[in-house]
Image: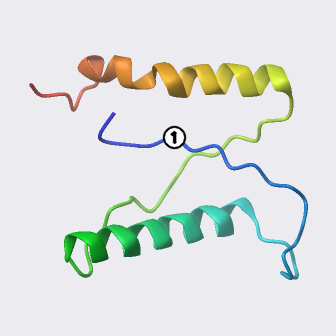
Amino acid sequence: MPNHIHVIFALNGKTAGASPRPTVMDIVCAYKSQTTRICNKEDNIPGRKIFQTSFYDEIIRNQTAYDEISKYIFENPMKWDEDELYTE
C-alpha cells in the first residue's frame, strides 16, 4: 500500500558500542530519519516530511508470530483497493 509501510527489524542482541541499548523507539526514529534524508536527497526536496510522528510496534516473540506477521505484510498490498484512502 502506498500510504504506509511494514518493517520487521531483527535485533541480534549486540550493542554495537551503544550504552544503554537503543529502544524500539530509538531504532524506528533512526530508520525514519535516515530514510527521509535519503529520499529527500534523491528527490532534491529538502525538509519534506515523509513519515507521521507515531507508529505501531509489535514484538515478535516466536516463529508462529513471525509467520503470521510476515504473511500479513506480504498480503497487505493486495488489500489496497479496500483502503479508505484508495483512489483509482
**Rendered view: 61 above or below 64:** below
What is the x, y in percent for residue 15?
88, 72
Query: Where does residue 46 sit, x and y in percent of width and height?
Result: 24, 81
* Nearer to me, 8 or 52: 8
Image location of residue 18, percent across then percent down: 83, 81
Q: Quadrant of residue 88?
A: top left
Q: Residue at x 27, y 80 (%)?
A: 47
Give the quadrant of residue 77.
top left
Q: Disc count in the image?
A: 1
Residue 71 versus residue 22: which sits nearer the camera?
A: 71
Amino acid type, callout 1: His
- For residue 14, side relative to residue 64 (left or right): right
Residue at disc 1, secondary structure: loop
- Residue 55 pos. (x, y %): 53, 52
Q: Quadrant of the N terminus?
A: top left
Mark 1 — residue? Answer: 6
Coloring applied to the structure? rainbow
Residue 9, above or below 64: below
Left or right: where 28 falls relative to 41: right
Residue at the left extreme?
88
